[in-house]
Image (cartoon, rainbow, N blue to C red):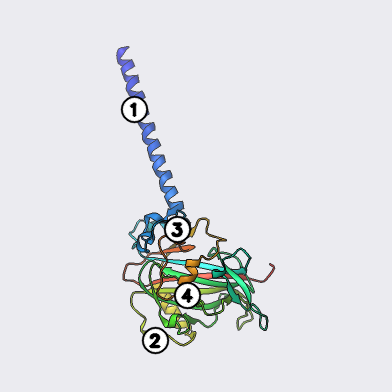
Amino acid sequence: MRNSKVQTIRWLIFLSVCVIALGRIQLKVSGNQDEDEIRDLTRTSWTSKRPHSATRIADTKYRIIQRLPKAIRRQSVAEDSEIGVTLWHLRPARSDDPIEIKELVQPTKGATKEEWTPERITSNAALEEGQMVRLSIESLRTGFLYVINRAKYKDGSYSDPYLIFPTKQIYGGNNKVEVGRAIQIPGPEEEPFMLQRDRSRGDDLQVSEELIILVTSQPLQSFLVAPTGRQKLTSQSVANLLAKYASPYEIAEKVGGTGNVITIAEKRVAKDSVGKLSAEDPYPQTIYRLTRKPSETMLLKIELQVRSKGR
């Protein structure tokens, strides 16, 4: 009888240990899932590499909307292989918008210039014809920035590609990029992009504007001197770049960032080729984490979906 009671107690102890262990495993799994869902920028190089002042902004949380494949996630990814992109759409300025952030834009040919305010939107926001947009690009890694633009049509074909950055018209051709230096495209003295839908040679309607962003460790030999304006490229040269440098990436969107207007600091840095954002200034709306080693070229392809007005 006594042996039976002892045996029962032992089994109860064993089961209790199993339950506690399973609970700990569950908590650990849940914690990992939370870390996958939300990324805290205060634990990364973005805050440590930007210049610091007296305080630090609290809103540095990002929600991961596209993960890397599991097999790649297990591999080590260079800490600085990240590119930040902020997409701004321009809305009519309001009386309570700071005067320093307003832009004078001529939205239609022949019309008088009006005041507009840049406002953050997500990377996958639905854009309409006639909408005006700008981009800000910041790299966690110091390098040289190149941006190629082409239209994509319904049948999957593309327009002729153009190198739209660097050019002499934007920062005098200075295309050095680093953390804190947010490069604005089109340039601060240029009109914003006016989204239009054209048609391909086969009469297929345009569905998106494609932007190919490269950050290289050294200047590209083909563009040691920045062209005066946007420069036409060959489709084959773009295909070669994609084949050589494209890699999977993770996408994270800033929590609570959409709808925020550009700050005075962001506006100032956009106009200045040497100024930097501090650790207390807003961070990019979208951060792309690429699977590239420290010395390798980072390439990112973004599609801005464009739809007919009113649809």
Q: Is residue 111 left or right of residue 54?
A: right
> Mark 2 highlights which residue?
225
Residue 151 position (above or below residue 65): below
Cα–Cα span, label 2 and label 1 = 73 Å
CA separation in Å, label 3 and label 4: 34 Å
**What's the mark number on residue 67?**
3
Return the residue nearer the eye: 271 or 154.
271
Q: Which residue is mark 4?
A: 271
> Residue, x 60% and y 84% (percent of image)?
201
Q: State the image quarter where residue 179 is shown.
A: bottom left
Question: Mark 4 or mark 1, which has the lower sequence index?
Answer: 1
> How far apart are labels 3 and 2 at the CA level?
37 Å
Q: Secondary structure at mark 4?
A: helix
10 Å crowding of disc 2: few (<14), some (14-19), many (20+): some
Name the amino acid, label 4.
Lys
CA distance for labels 4 and 2: 21 Å
